[in-house]
Amino acid sequence: MPPSEAGLVRRTIWLLRTVAAHPEGVGLSDIARESGIPKATCYRVLTVLERESWLTLDPVTRRYRVSLGLLSIVGGLLDGGGSYGHMREVVRQLASDTKETAGFDVLLAPQVMVVAQTQGPSLIGQTPKPVPRTQPVWATSTGKVLLAALTPEEVRAEFAEEFTKHAPKQLGSFADFIDSLDEVRERGYAFSVDELETGAASVAAPVRVRDATPYAVWIGGPSYRLTPEAITDLAETVRKAARQLGDLLSVSDLELPSALTGR
């Protein structure tokens, strides 16, 4: 590897370690100071890492954090007793309890990213979908749940243009979609039937971490099993898993382990 490329890889690792050392988030100036890398170089590298969903940037505080997308990629390296392992265990238990595929998503506007997934028993022998992967925010139960956690004003400001370009016509107008989120908030869960794929259904619940709702947990399967009656029956099981995940993440903050952060 040429020296210039080796140097870039080394700087990228240093920046990831610096951000991972601040699970509460860290600003650009502090990253540059702690890493010893010029601010302009930090910004260029961080912009690429954010674009690739390895980091997230809070639009209000302008603080960077390690993303769950990155954690899903390095999940095999994480301590099995760590918070990421516990999170995956909750998802596995949800799949076992419901006998359906279960997963954990994060909102990466204008899509949602599946960052963890456990196959349902009926899919044994079939090729599972890749993780992480992104899916349309409009056609997924997790997308609806995560948009319902925003204010109507935030949804209009951030998603109106995307809705106009890409939302399926069966959803109706953007105003109708905004109104439908009130029902999601009232129920405490959302469902999707024949929206992402014909013959597929899912139900999702919000994962509240302290005062925010950054994640959602879901189960999915064929619509002939996940009928309206089944969705109603299974929704409380999904909501229970969401509460467990919220409690876990509120305490642990899903830090990278010392082997990766250098601490």
Image: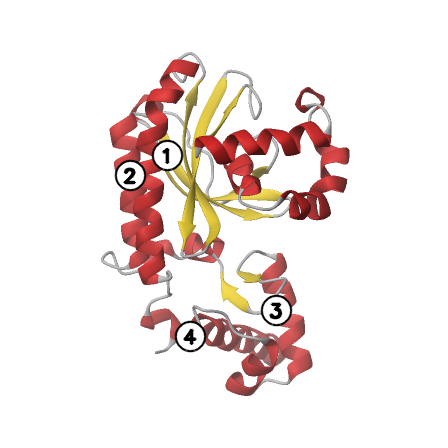
Gap between marks 4 and 2 measured at Cα:
28 Å
Gap between marks 4 and 3 measured at Cα:
16 Å
Whether residue 227 is visible: no
Graded by Cα atoms within 10 Å as few (under 14), some (14 to 19) or many (20 or more), the crowding at tag 1 reads many
Q: Amino acid at mark 3?
A: Arg
The residue that mark 3 highlights is: 62
User: Are discs 4 and 2 less than 8 Å apart at CB?
Assistant: no
Which disc, if any, is residue 102?
1
Give me the residue at 76% from left, 41% from top.
Answer: 161
The residue tagged with tag 4: helix, strand or loop?
loop
Gap between marks 2 and 3 measured at Cα:
34 Å
- Closer mark to the observer between disc 4 and disc 3: 3
In which quarter of the view is residue 95 placed? top left
Graded by Cα atoms within 10 Å as few (under 14), some (14 to 19) or many (20 or more), the crowding at tag 4 reads many
The residue that mark 2 highlights is: 92
Which disc, if any, is residue 50?
none
Which disc, if any, is residue 21?
4
Q: Say which of 152 and 219 sits in front.
A: 152
Q: Amino acid at mark 2?
A: Arg
Gap between marks 4 and 1 measured at Cα:
30 Å
Whether residue 259 is visible: yes
User: Are discs 2 and 1 less than 8 Å apart at CB?
Assistant: yes
x and y, in percent, of residue 195 in the image: 58, 23
Residue 155 vertical placement versus 224 (above, below):
below
User: Are discs 2 and 3 less than 8 Å apart at CB?
Assistant: no
Using residue 180 as the reference point, say whether residue 214 is left or right of it: left
The residue tagged with tag 2: helix, strand or loop?
helix
User: Are discs 4 and 3 less than 8 Å apart at CB?
Assistant: no
- Closer mark to the observer between disc 1 and disc 3: 3
Residue 6 vertical placement versus 160 (above, below):
below
Nearest to N terminus: mark 2 or mark 3:
3
